[in-house]
Structures are given as C-alpha cells and as structure tokens.
Image (spheres, rainbow, N blue to C red):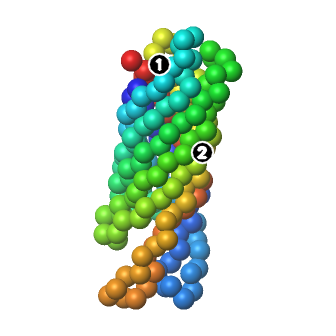
C-alpha cells in the first residue's frame, strides 16, 4: 500500500517557550505525507489489520519541519464500499527553525473508500499528543510543543 495524504485542517496548540507562563495559542499545521504499509486480509479479501510508516514535510504556522510516525490500524469490514478503522501509533516531529525534535503519540479514526480496483480515498481524524517536552539546558526554559486535531485526506493504491 502506498498513500499520499494532506492535512486538510488542524488546530494545533503551541505552548510558548516561557516555562513559567505556559501560555497557549493556536497555529495552523499543514503537511504533505507519504505512507507505505501493508495489511492482513481475510479469505473474502477484506482488510482486517494494517500497518504503515508515514513521513512528510510539515509547516506549523511559520515553522518548517519533518514528521515521521508508525501506526497500526484495525478495520471493521462492514462493506466492500467502506472500510472504517481505528489507528494508534507513535512518531516524531523535527522543527528546522527551532532545531528541536518532539516525540508524539497519535490515535484516530477514519475510513478507506475504494474508488476503483486497487485505488482508494482515505479520510481520517487523528489526535496528536506530544510527549513531555524537554528542558533546554542553556535557557532553562521548556521547549515548544505542539498538539491538536488533524483531519487527513489522501489517495492510496493497494498492490
């Protein structure tokens, strides 16, 4: 399976680097991601479990970066025209402008909609939860962290 996703919308919270204030503000997150994965199908050619590695270019407000994550998907084979799933995984985000990285967990729900033999649309809603930010030794301030909801839209091909 190969899939190209774009994050259609995400309200991401950015906590300022001032560890005492921990003020929050909203920024947009845009990304273009490539997913490569596989799955387990039953005897009726219905997908039951899937795995994927997803990487891509991300932009959070005015900051540029890269993301990489791995996840598992569990499918409910209710129809040949709709494959709903739940997903759980972990990954990381590297922000070039801040020269910092952050680990994150994500959980989500979604559906794959077959459009022709082998091709499908992917629509998913994920919540990204960052790991505890590290303390910057030089400034003694908490590093910036991001979390929030992501609505993903993608086109995939199963071979």
Residue 97 quadrant: bottom left
Q: Name the spot of residue 31 as percent of width and height, x first.
A: 43, 48
Residue 119 tag number: 1
Q: Residue furthest right?
A: 78
How far across and down, in percent of the image, does residue 22 sit? 56, 81
The quadrant of the image that shows the C terminus is top left
- Callout 1: 10 Å neighbours few (<14), some, many (20+)? some
> Is disc 1 in contact with disc 2, using a CB cutoff of under 8 Å?
no
Q: Position of residue 105 (x, y in %)?
A: 51, 56
Secondary structure under the numbered disc 2 in the rendered image: strand
Mark closest to the chain's N terminus, 1 or 2? 2
Q: Quadrant of residue 95?
A: bottom left
Eye-nearest disc, 1 or 2 = 2
The reply to whether residue 19 is visible in this rendering is yes
Which of the pair 112/43 is nearer the observer? 43
Q: Is residue 72 above or below residue 84?
A: below
Q: Secondary structure at mark 1?
A: strand
The residue shown at (42%, 53%) is: 91
Taking depth in this image into account, of 75 and 33 the one nearest to the observer is 75
Count of marks overlaid on the render: 2
Disc assigned to residue 21 = none
Residue under the image location 58 percent in, 58 percent down:
148
Horizontal side, residue 50 vs residue 82: left or right: left
Identified at 65% across, 27% down, the residue is: 76
Q: Which residue is mark 2?
A: 108
Judging depth in this view, the residue of 43 and 105 nearest the camera is 43
Which residue sits at x=41%, y=81%? 135
Q: Quadrant of residue 109?
A: top right
Q: Is residue 41 above or below residue 53?
A: above
Image quadrant in which the N terminus is located? top left
**Camera sees residue 9:** no
């Amino acid at each position: 399976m190969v899939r190209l996703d774009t994050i259609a919308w995400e309200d991401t919270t950015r906590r300022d680097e001032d560890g005492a204030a921990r003020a929050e503000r909203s920024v947009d997150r845009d990304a273009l991601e490539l997913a490569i994965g596989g799955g387990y199908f039953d005897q009726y050619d219905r997908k039951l479990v899937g795995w994927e590695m997803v990487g891509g270019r991300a932009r959070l407000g005015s900051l540029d970066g890269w993301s990489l994550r791995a996840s598992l998907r569990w499918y409910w084979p209710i129809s040949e025209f709709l494959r709903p799933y739940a997903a759980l995984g972990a990954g990381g985000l590297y922000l070039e402008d801040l020269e910092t990285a952050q680990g994150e967990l994500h959980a989500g729900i979604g559906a794959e909609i077959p459009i022709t033999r082998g091709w499908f649309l992917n629509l998913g809603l994920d919540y990204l939860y960052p790991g505890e930010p590290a303390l910057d030794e030089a400034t003694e301030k908490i590093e910036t962290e991001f979390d929030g909801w992501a609505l993903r839209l993608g086109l995939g091909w199963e071979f």
